[in-house]
Amino acid sequence: SEPSPRRSIRDLPDELISQIAAGEVVERPASAVRELVDNALDAGATQITLRLLAGGVRLIAVEDDGAGIPDSELHLALRRHATSKIASLHELESVATMGFRGEALAAIASVSEMAVLSRPPGQASAFLLDARSGELRPAARSQGTTVEVKELFFSTPARRKFLKSDATELAHCVQAVRRHALARPDVGFAIWHEGQLVEQWRPTFGPAAAGDAEAWRTALGRRLADVLGEDFLQQSVPVHLRRGSVEVTGWAGLPDAARSRADQQYCYVNGRFVRDKVLAHAARSAYEDVLHGNRQPVYALYVRMDPQRVDVNVHPTKIEVRFRDSREVHQAVRHAIDNALAAPRAQQLLQQQA
Ligand code: ADP
Ligand code: MG
């Protein structure tokens, strides 16, 4: 066929830029859930409640009791590359919040009907911003923020066609919240779908215990049991190792708890859920001698390290990271699990299983 005649270069309209960017960030309802829960956590929420309709396609409402957004900044919150979380490259390099790119709300708003209702402490009333019309009006709400996302992908039918059944989309949404919940025993989570309570995880770590590392680990263990089941904890041994600047804590499943699918492997770096080859490989190699064939270990590992030694700005969804010294991290994780599996409690449990 004839090559089409050349068209001149032009700037894309803002809305289209956001829709293109949304393709990277918002793949399905669960991606929006992840971003909105990130925001609630960054705002210091202690309770996060999700209400979903039709697997999140018709409605995702995320309600928190966090710091809120002043009415004067509500428009900015929806603007691309507008964020309250970093202000310089220096801050980017040691970022401690889940978000920092200032993209999520703009991206989600460009492929849905979004409304943000928020009230920071000290503001006389809440305000509601309708993203599409830009209308801002007073509304009723206690302190915190509710973001409502309706009719996801209504304007991008191609994307909408790739969505699976409501049940499948719901399962992905729940999984997204589970990943957050496993790292934050100090925060309560509730998920409602079509008016039914689907999951509820209560906080097991109060502000009174702040700074108490032992109490935090205990709370993490209790949250693990709540979210993944008592069995997970019963069939795991605690992991705890500090090596150089890397600290690894968590739970490693005994070989008998291994599964045919790698669907219970949770890794966190500085509180952020990540999918990372270095961590997965390190864990896998620790199980090398005790797991055979395609058996997949189960574990929940929490890696803490100097934020300057890990780059979280690798992927738009921030699910991938890059370590400055990946050997150091690999060795720490491997030894942490090696030690845990060799500990007396593990040996005792292994003998019982044999
Ligand atoms: P980012 O999280 O990368 O900053 P977002 O687009 O997700 O970008 O959010 C933009 C801004 O809106 C945030 O920086 C924050 O100031 C504000 N914001 C979003 N959600 C909330 C919330 N639940 N509570 C308080 N502020 C919020
Ligand atoms: Mg965000």
Image (spheres, rainbow, N blue to C red):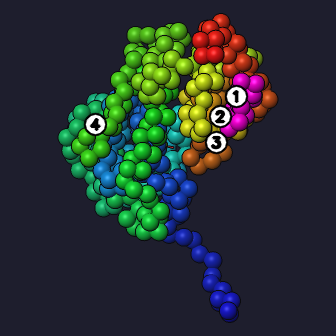
From the image, state whether disc 4 or disc 2 is nearer to you: 2
Contact flag, marks 3 and 4 (Cβ < 8 Å)? no
| Residue drawn at (54%, 11%) of the image | 213
Depth order, front residue of 14/255: 255
x then y, percent, for residue 232: 51, 23
- Number of numbered labels in the structure image: 4
Disc 3 residue type (three-letter): Glu
Label 3 crowd bin: few (<14), some (14–19), many (20+), radius 10 Å: some
Answer yes or no: disc 3 within 8 Å of ligand 1.
Answer: no
Residue 52 vs residue 6: left or right?
A: left
The answer to which image quadrant residue 117 occupies is top left
Look at mark 2 in the image and give the residue it sits on.
Answer: 295
From the image, state whether disc 4 or disc 1 is nearer to you: 1
Q: Is residue 309 visible?
A: no
Mark 3 → mark 4, Cα distance in angstroms = 32 Å
Q: Is residue 168 visible?
A: yes
- The local secondary structure at tag 2 comes to loop
Residue 197's disc is 4
| Residue drawn at (62%, 8%) of the image | 348
From the image, state whether disc 1 or disc 3 is nearer to you: 1
Mark 4 → mark 1, Cα distance in angstroms = 38 Å
Look at mark 1 in the image and give the residue it sits on.
Answer: 291
Look at mark 3 in the image and give the residue it sits on.
Answer: 320
Mark 1 → mark 2, Cα distance in angstroms = 6 Å
Q: Which of marks 3 and 1 precedes in the sequence?
A: 1
- The local secondary structure at tag 1 comes to loop
